[in-house]
Amino acid sequence: VAVAWPRPAPLPLRPPPAPRRRRVNGLGNPPAGGGAGRPAFADAAVQNLLYKMTGLNLQKVFRPVKKELKPPRYKLMTEAQLEEATRKAIEEAKEKLIMPPVLNEREPIDDVLAEDKFLEGSETTKYVFTDLTYSIPHRERFIVVREPNGVLRKATWEERDRMIQIFFPKEGRRVIPPVVFKDEHLVTVFQQDRHEDILNRCIAQFEPDSPDYIRVHHRTYDDIEKHGKYDLLRSTRHFGGMVWYLVNRKKTDGLLIDMIHRDLLDDATSLITLYHMLHPECQSAKEAKEGNLQGVDLIKVFVKTESQKEGYIQLALQAYEEATATSTAS
Amino acid sequence: ALFAGSRLLKGYRGGHVVIRFALGGCTNRPFFRIVAAHSRRARDGKYLEQLGCLDPLPNAHGERVAGLNLERLRHWLGCGAQLSRPAEKLLGRPGAWGPGWGPATARRGSPLLLAGLAGFLPLHPMTVTGAERLRRRRGQEAVAPPADGSPGAR
């Protein structure tokens, strides 16, 4: 999927460029979940499924961001103009819903460039040197540290991020990561139901392959899954990432129930299709491929074989079927 | 229009381009800018280009932060700029390829990028000498006080 990264004012996200390229298309790099032949987060099919599940609630996407207070503007439009405006709004919303990348955790840097033992003791603190050449990508920048014992080594990822933020500041990012990203404070954030805000802030603050980014995202997804607050992230750009995380860990039951309760059968089928793509060796995947099942049958097969909360899902399905029966009957 | 002999355009006799530290900051809070300027200019005066900075005081993580625009540094060194003594200590000694220096261990500048360039950033001899002198002095101090301490303790 070739995506052009949008740069909206408060929270820009810059993906990690592959070597020699400033802008990477989508989510290149090793597939999340490893293993040859396994579908990756970036595959077109997977992205399609995740995008369908994310939904497109214009009211939520264009929910007012706290800005300077201005009086509302009213426009008088014909039907055709209104349709045109809605179409444009949908396109803008699609851009806003581009999913941030899901990458593996980065390897720590541990490279000694020179050892000069005779320098030991002549300095008391370490020196950090940053190459300020403007035209090289941040991932290829040289940032080296000369320790007081004379060793010249490459800087660790945390030092790199700090130095790059000092010399090339990015909006929305702080030099020292805010305290709110620590586990004890994340709990408070979750109690206030502000998962989307904390995820947006996390995207602005950390690089996608840093351990902090991955940890915050996983905590958020776990909390949402524990309390069943899936709707908080629906129609935002984080929904795809959450679904990917849950499907990889086979914790899809709560989400499935939620979708059935909200009468989103298409989303439920997409979820199960994605599950089969990622875990092709499971029972329901084989049955589905043999029988070439669609729709509600697919869900039933999945429920019988894979899910833990079978009873709940059966109940929900029954309720849904009754509802459709009564609505078609009346 | 600039008139000949105008106070604004100062003409110097002789002089060359140097890369040196210009001091800024406030009282008890120095801050150096690594700068390419004419040698006859004031230390903090008009310069040709700023090539980086150095904060001599350690920050909250105990490190002294320095930034160097290596690409422009290479350009000015290619134009024939000299380095001042502290800049030499920080960056290395261009043109000091000698039999005594061994492998191209870069001084505190970036090694890999510039090790290929002829002689940029091998170690300054004063660094080695300074470190040896410091060690020798510390060794003497370690020996001397016990000799004075015991008679002085009475």
Image (cartoon, rainbow, N blue to C red):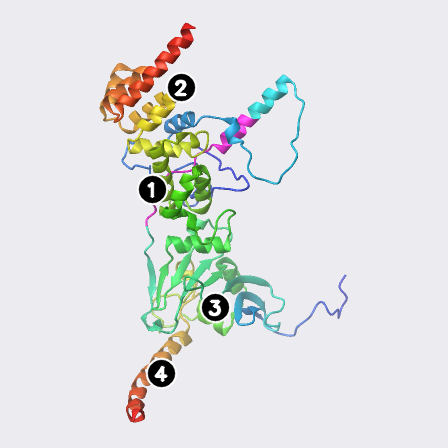
Q: Nearer the viewer, mark 3 or mark 2?
A: 2
Q: Which residue is mark 1?
A: A104
Front residue (pair B94, A21): A21
Residues at marks 1 and 3 touching, judged by CB atoms closer than 8 Å: no
Q: Chain of mark 3?
A: B
Q: Chain of mark 4?
A: B
Q: Which residues are magenta?
A: A89-107
The residue type indicated by label 1 comes to Asn
Q: Which mark sits nearer the N-terminus, 4 or 3?
A: 3
Q: Which mark is residue A263?
A: 2
- Could you say where residue A89 lies in the image, as x and y percent from the top left? 56, 27
Q: CA distance from mark 3 to mark 2?
A: 64 Å
Give the answer, above or below, for where A78 lies relative to A6. Answer: above
Callout 3 secondary element? loop
Circles 4 and 1 on the same subunit: no
Q: Which mark is residue B56?
A: 3
Circles 1 and 3 on the same subunit: no
Q: CA distance from mark 4 to mark 3?
A: 24 Å
Circles 4 and 3 on the same subunit: yes
Residues at marks 4 and 2 touching, judged by CB atoms closer than 8 Å: no
Give the answer, above or below, for where A213 lies relative to B33. Answer: above
Residue lying at 42% horizontally and 72% vertically, measured from the top left? B124
